[in-house]
Amino acid sequence: MKKAIIYISLLLTVLLIGCTPPTQKEVAEEPVVLEEPAMEDAIKEEAEPVAEYRKITAEEAKDMMVEGNLTIDVRTKEEYDQGYIEGALLVPLDTLMREEYDQLPEKDQVILVYCRSGNRSRTASQLLVKAGYTQVYDFGGINSWPYDVVKE
């Protein structure tokens, strides 16, 4: 019982000492001063947005398509021929993996990306962002597309 009381006392002492705020003297001893260049660098780092794609719903994608934004299908040619979303441009994932972006010349254009189930569209979206495209939207797979598709 005495050992338990001693351990509890020691634990409370450590907690109280560790949680005590610094004294005025301790605060005053270590002033933190940022030099002008460091401040400018910090501001520049905050101002630059982190490039990333956005995951959106099929409904949001449909609304964005009506606005005339580019839609790309990253499935294979064979899959595309079985049915695709009207107006979609076929840019297979293999093409993007080979860093061939000839069909997508404008890096600041809105690009809506889909595949069959959502896996390849995620990979393609990541590749596009890495290549410098700034407005990439992944809406998953055609399997969950609730609207009409073109079948030839």
Image (cartoon, helix red, strand yellow):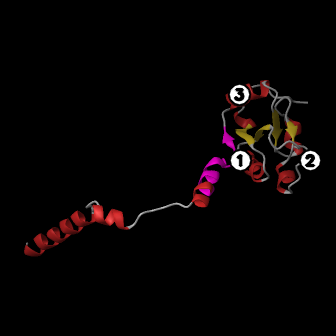
Which region shows up in magenta?
41-55
Name which of mark 3 and mark 2 comes first in the sequence.
2
* Residue 71: image location, x then y, percent: 81, 35
Discs 3, 2 touching: Cβ within 8 Å: no
* Residue 29: image location, x then y, percent: 36, 67
Amino acid type, label 3: Pro
- Quadrant including the C terminus: top right
Name which of mark 2 and mark 1 comes first in the sequence.
2
Say if 63 sits above or below 120 in the image. Answer: above
Name which of mark 3 and mark 1 comes first in the sequence.
1
Name the residue rendered at 74%, 45% in the picture. Answer: 121
Name the residue rendered at 64%, 47% in the picture. Answer: 47
Amino acid type, label 2: Asp
- Quadrant including the N terminus: bottom left
Viewer-closest of 68 and 46? 46
Discs 2, 1 touching: Cβ within 8 Å: no
Mark 3: give few (<14), some (14-19) or many (20+) Cα within 10 Å: few
Q: Secondary structure at mark 3?
A: loop
Viewer-closest of 39 and 131? 39
Q: Is residue 6 left or right of residue 14?
A: left
Viewer-closest of 22 and 15? 22
Residue wearing tag 1: 122
The numbered dot on residue 141 is none
* Residue 39: image location, x then y, percent: 58, 56
In this view, the mark in front (3 or 2): 2
Name the residue rendered at 19%, 68% in the picture. Answer: 13
Place residue 31 in its image quadrant: bottom left
Q: Is residue 151 left or right of residue 117?
A: right
Task: Report, in whole angstroms, how far the alpha carbon at label 3 lies from the one at label 1.
Answer: 19 Å
The numbered dot on residue 102 is 2
Q: Secondary structure at mark 1?
A: helix
In this view, the mark in front (2 or 1): 2
